[in-house]
Image: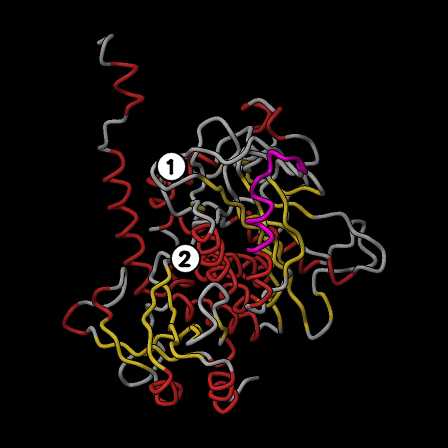
Amino acid sequence: MAEKKDILKMVKEHDVKFIRLWFTDVLGCVKSFAITDAELEGALENGMGFDGSSITGYQDIEESDMIAMPDLSTFQILPWRPTEKAVARMICDVLNPDRTPYEGDPRYVLKKALARASKMGFDHYYLGPELEFFYFKNDDKTEILDKGGYFDLTTLDVASDLRRETVLALERMGIHVEYSHHEVAPSQHEVDMRYKDALEMADSVITYRVVVKEIASKFGVYATFMPKPIFGVNGSGMHTHQSLFKGEKNAFFDPKSEDHLSDTAYKFIAGLLKHSKEICSIFAQTTNSYKRLVPGYEAPVYIAWSRRNRSALVRVPFYYPGKEKATRCEFRACDPACNPYLTFAAMLHSGLEGIEKGYKIPEPMDLNLYHLTAAERKKKGIETLPDSLGHAISITENSELVKKALGDHIFSRFVELKKKEWDNYRIQVTQYELDKYLSTT
């Protein structure tokens, strides 16, 4: 664990002049302000004050004073900035003026979820999210860079250098990368981070999104994590692998079980399934998210689990002998535009609820759920995720679990923000409607 003297030493050795202090608003957008090296020692000791009334979902103007307290473990030099008078970043916890944790800080929401897991005997909540994204020529329209497909290694994949530079930048920032490759859709890509504890991973996700965009900008193109930017092709997801550990022991593994899943794992998965509708507006928080959550494009909409079957909401990857620590479940409905702190907290609370209350897991669905008729799915008791943000937020606002997970402050503000977003969206008159109805009605 880094100490203040270590940070100050690195700043001097690497000629760091500016330190950007990062935190996120309620929706997961990174907010930042910079201090100079001369202010750093005081910031590490006392934090830096800022106006919280201008941050989405934060304080009202009459109670706007906030403190950004840097987390010493998050100091990293930004590799895309000059090496002379370099720039570093530190991710912050947001505090009230009396130095208590601020209830509106998404990072604090995840810390509280992890504290619940700890009280239940789980020392680690490991996560391995797979964030997909698109490269376009600019941010004005969806003009693709290539026509490649899944795992393509062709001259069409002009983004190979982009991915290479992105991986190098991530690793220079202490983020270990396992894979990088072209995804299914044209100009769609993926860089997978190695699993780590939830809080560190949420920090890594917001860093990852900044790095991908910064490197793209360096090459004169635009990267987007919009879930469904192009009609008729796959959207971008954030499939999230997860497991609970007690010390060094994987609580999801049982050598005597037929599929090597423990009773704890079954109950955790049951919790994810049972509460998936309630937390849907969190892991799929934009109106565009629901253009991705439709059958036929690898985005799961049917609430079921399976072994290896990718059409189900929760998938259990194949077990390899000797890889007990890799036993995990994969939640496949999240998209990369979500707030990772809130999303990881909501999933963890859902799973812990299943463990605590002893939820019974349904039978696995090891067939392609897209090939079933509506009547067949109904007969098997398979429900679907909400089909719009409006539908999703109407379920969320009545959820005691989400209210407990987010806390009263973020819960009320998140619901209010999403209701406004849905209202603004549903009154729009789209080009599709004009093309379809203007000349025929």
| Residue furthest top as drawn | 440
Is 304 left, or right, of 42 in this rendering?
right
Is 427 left, or right, of 41 in this rendering?
left
Mark 1 Cα shell of 10 Å, populated few (<14), some (14-19), many (≥20) = many
| Residue furthest left as drawn | 62
> Closer to the camera, 34 or 49?
34
- Mark 1 vs 2: CB contact within 8 A: no
| x then y, percent, for residue 125 | 60, 66
Q: Quadrant of the N terminus?
A: bottom right
> Closer to the camera, 44 or 310?
44
Asked if residue 84 shows in the view, the reply is: yes
Q: How many marks?
A: 2
Q: Residue at x 33, y 40 (%)?
A: 390
Magenta range: 152-166
> Closer to the camera, 425 or 419?
425
Of the two numbered discs 1 and 2 on the same chain, state the one appearing first in sequence: 1
- In this figure, which residue is indicated by the disc labeled 1? 388
Element at label 1: loop
Q: Residue at x 23, y 27 (%)?
A: 429
On residue 402, the disc is 2
Q: Quadrant of the C terminus?
A: top left
Specify the amino acid type for callout 1. Ser
- Indicate whether residue 162 is drawn in magenta: yes
What is the CA distance from the residue labelled 1 to the residue labelled 2? 18 Å
Q: Residue at x 57, y 55 (%)?
A: 165
Asked if residue 224 shows in the view, the reply is: no
Specify the amino acid type for callout 2. Val
